[in-house]
Image (spheres, grey):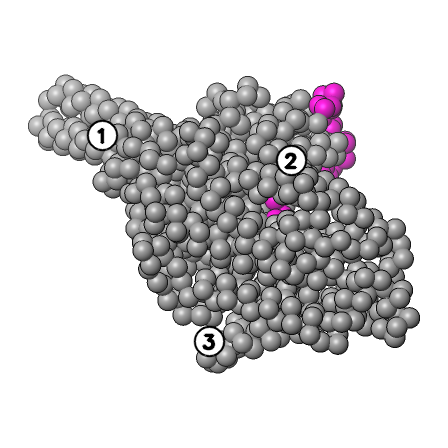
Amino acid sequence: MDIFLQQIINGLVQGSIYALVALGYTMVYGIMGLINFAHGEVVMIGTLVTISVAGFLIKAGMPVMFAGLAGLTVSVLVCMALGWGLERVAYRPLRNAPRLTPLITAIGMSIVLQNVAMIIWGRNYLTFPALLPSVAFEFAGAHFTAVQVIIVLVSALTMLALLFLIYRTRLGMAMRATSQNPAVASLMGVNINRVIAAAFIIGSALGALAGVMVGTYYEIAHYQMGFMLGLKAFTAAVLGGIGNLAGAMLGGILLGLIEALGAGYIGDLTGGFLGSHYQDIFAFLVLIVVLMFKPSGLFGEKTGDRA
Amino acid sequence: MQAKLSVVALSIASVFALSACGEKEAPKPVEAPPAAAPVAPPPKPEVTVKLGHVAPMTGPQAHLGKDNENGALLAIEELNAQGLEIGGAKVKFELLAEDDQADPKQGTIVAQKLVDAKVNGVIGHLNSGTTIPASKLYSDAGIPQISGSATNPKYTQQGFKTAFRVMANDIQQGKALGEFAAKQGVKTVAIIDDRTAYGQGLADEFKKGAEANGLKVVATEYTNDKATDFKAILTKIKSKKADLVFYGGMDAQGGPMAKQMADLGIKAKFLGGDGVCTPEFMKLGGAATEGHFCSLPGMPLEKLAKGPEFKDKFVKKFNGEIQLYAPYVYDAVMVMADSMKRANSVEAAKFLPEIGKTNYDGVTAKITFDEFGDLTGGAISVYQYKGGKLEYVTTVGAPVDVAKAEVKEAVGEVKEAVKAVAGAAAEAGKDAIKAGADAVKDAAEATKAAVEKK
């Protein structure tokens, strides 16, 4: 039983990380129907910038907590600028292009960002400074750390803040209007360019936040860390219904839980026929089944046919 | 639109799932080219020898790939500084460095590229998973290949005359580690591997070694060479209460794994092969690596005659620590150059037979090859992570051949001494007899020492 509980905790934390990244995907998709594959790389840049800034400040003698906060602030700002730049340079010129073009551009930007990061930060793994004291708890035989609790809380709070932004503010209203019909929205006086740029900037800020969380959790970073994370988070977003904030959150946590329980029990369930290397099969099987019966994902809303 | 989206999502998901599954399948080497004629050195006084070097220069193992390349670059630089003359021409060595991304498919693509570029020899690849499929292409083209780090036994067991390695293979390593684990008083072990040719091969050999020494394998789990989260499989291992966790894989996964073991309150010791015996492992695992073990083929660099000198040269030139295989790759280049010298030719067809006859005193070992192209009598050293440093613990599975040779030499000395006694007796000189008897005594002691060492 304690093992089951431990696996639930493992899955919940992993899932919260997926969810935090998935929010960035879903935010951009919901507004302009673009799958921003470079989002995983934005997360990676967020982590690496934090390492550089916090590492420098810690060396300069600043208390670890403040250095961490400063690192977080700088990386959020850098990623916001990056998100804005990506939209301005790579996606805005293609706004009226066929659907596939911006998708391919996004994959291209992802590769560009990876290589830029490789040039700046090198090929080696970097260690993320321990920003939070490693306090461990034990509950009913299951171990968890303060970092894990914070990750789950931050993801939940971020999602609530986003929901507030979308449904309770003017910008949110403009975003919803753009999502429904950009042409009509612009006729109603909504500045489409500004709304889309805002979506990228907010999504990238979330990416930076996710990057710091991932870094604090695993305490390692590498210029390729964003790729796999981005892919899984994208899967989570699709699972929950891409374009839907609550769906991204739920999809992320669901994916984390499926992976943890899959890896933990697949061997025993199949009598050793399938080992834990088949854990991804569970995740993708669930995705395929969900898409077969509910093509818009678990929470997906019907959106207008446009691109 | 929705239908479109689900199609896009599905196809992306399936591509990903396929690529995830595909990694386990033996990659099909691209169609082998007709045996390319080896380049004839132009009748000019200067000839350029092109050596291919392949390692992952991007991706999670890029740090190890760069390390290998640095080892090769150092060797090439020294060779060029020596101003070698082979076959009457001044030789200039040139490194054609390729990136295989640690991916078997990419490995065969760059191998083909090197074959087309008509390289004189290939150093590499780094990973067993890329080395094995690529070795067929080199064999078909008659290009000699020496790997400094591919330890999977299969590499040299395919019957290719062109395949050599300057490091002990995983059969030796797995056996030695099994013995070592048993000596540590471990009763139950859990095994994790990363499903690469190297990780899986090493884990399988360790399993054999552990079971041969009476250990019980209580869990076998898997991850992959790009993973960062191991909590799910470690939690399962925790429930099986293993005394030791063995990991067949590389440092990029091993370090975080050791850390997550500590997070989950697992008290078992961690043991890994050469892939985790790096400074990077300790950097990534932090304090959680303290007291864990890993092994490296060969003897520690500090204990080798040319080791410290090599380390100084390397650190000075590249302004950084040796990660792992650089000295082995350095030796691989030197062995190839040495074979060219002995053959007095840079043509692959001519110097290939000489590689098999190598007897080269390298940085990492005295290099001789057996009939398969494997290093003879490779020793395995075990290290413990202590205070952020790799501390040498012991050498397991002592180099049998070396010990044998020492015994033989000592026996020879005894015989000679006896002869000396006989000769002395003939001269009937009392002093001479005494001297002869002393010599016998000394030689006998030498024999005893050699036997004990073995």
* Residue picked out by circle 2: B18
| Residue B219 lies in quadrant | top left
> How far, Cα to Cα, is label 2 from label 3?
43 Å
Query: The residue tagged with tag 1: helix, strand or loop?
Result: helix
Between B243 and A37, the one nearer to me in the picture: A37
- Verify CB contact (< 8 Å) between mark 2 and mark 3: no
Q: What's the chain of the residue with tag 3?
A: A
Of all chains, the one bearing label 1 is B
In the image, is residue A98 above or below residue A76? above
Q: Quadrant of residue B93?
A: top right
- Mark 2 Cα-neighbour bin, 10 Å: few <14, some 14–19, many ≥20: few
Q: Which residue is at a point 33% across and 35% down the rendered structure image?
A: B218
Compute the Cα span from label 2 to label 1.
55 Å
B425 left or right of B268?
left
- Give how far across and how far down residue B47 sits, in percent: 72, 37
In-image side of B39 versus A6 (left or right):
right
Give the extent of the magenta segment.
B31-59
The secondary structure that most of the magenta stretch takes on is loop
| Disc 1 target residue | B451
Is B53 included in the stretch rendered in magenta? yes
Circle 2: element type: helix
**Image point 70% across, 41% down: which residue?**
B10
**What percent of the width, then of the height, locates residue A124?**
56, 56
Q: Position of residue B341 (x, y in %)?
A: 59, 32
Mark 1 belongs to which amino acid? Val
Please report the residue visible at 36 percent of the width from the left and 63 percent of the height from the top: A136
- Whether labels 2 and 1 belong to a single chain: the reply is yes
